[in-house]
Amino acid sequence: MWETRFHCACGHRFEAQEVEEAVREIIRVASLLARVLAQQARDLAEIRRAGEASFRAWASRFADAVAGSLGAMAGRLVGSLLRALD
């Protein structure tokens, strides 16, 4: 196998060592790409979780503010009614 030569359709001839090095490089790059894609997937999942948590916190603060405003309005209305009845 080490004495084998590979002939390309373009007419170029590659020695076995060159082919082996190219295949090793392809495997190395593919492995690196797999690690990068896996990390990117983990990062995107973390961003999604953080976004959901942030939205939940905002919605909770908004609901609290609305409830507080409605409570204050109801209190003023009841106070006005009680004053009017006195």
Image: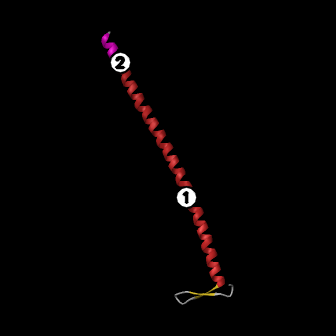
Q: Is residue 47 above or below residue 63?
A: below
Q: Amino acid at mark 1?
A: Gln
Using the image, tell me which numbered label, if any, was put on residue 12.
none
Range of residues picked out in magenta:
80-85
**Residue denoted by label 1:** 40
x then y, percent, for residue 31: 61, 67
Q: Is residue 20 above or below residue 28?
A: below
Q: Is residue 84 above or below residue 40?
A: above
**Left or right: residue 53 compared with residue 13:** left
Q: Residue at x 33, y 17 (%)?
A: 80
Q: Is residue 43 above or below residue 74?
A: below
Task: Inspect the magenta stretch and tell me whether residue 84 lies in it.
Answer: yes
Select label 2 or label 1 by which is in front: 1
**Of 19 and 82, the residue lying toward us:** 19
Q: Residue furthest top?
A: 86
Q: Residue furthest right?
A: 2
Q: Residue furthest bottom?
A: 11
Task: Inspect the magenta stretch and tell me whether residue 68 lies in it.
Answer: no
Using the image, tell me which numbered label, if any, was put on residue 78.
2
Q: Check disc 1 and report its element: helix, strand or loop.
A: helix
Quarter residue 12 falls in: bottom right
x then y, percent, for residue 70: 38, 27
**Left or right: residue 62 compared with residue 86:** right
Q: Residue furthest left?
A: 84
Q: Residues within 10 Å of mark 2 (few under 14, many from 20)?
A: few
Quadrant holding the C terminus: top left
x then y, percent, for residue 15: 64, 86
Whole-number angstrom distance, CA of label 2 to CA of label 1? 56 Å
* Nearest to N terminus: mark 2 or mark 1: 1
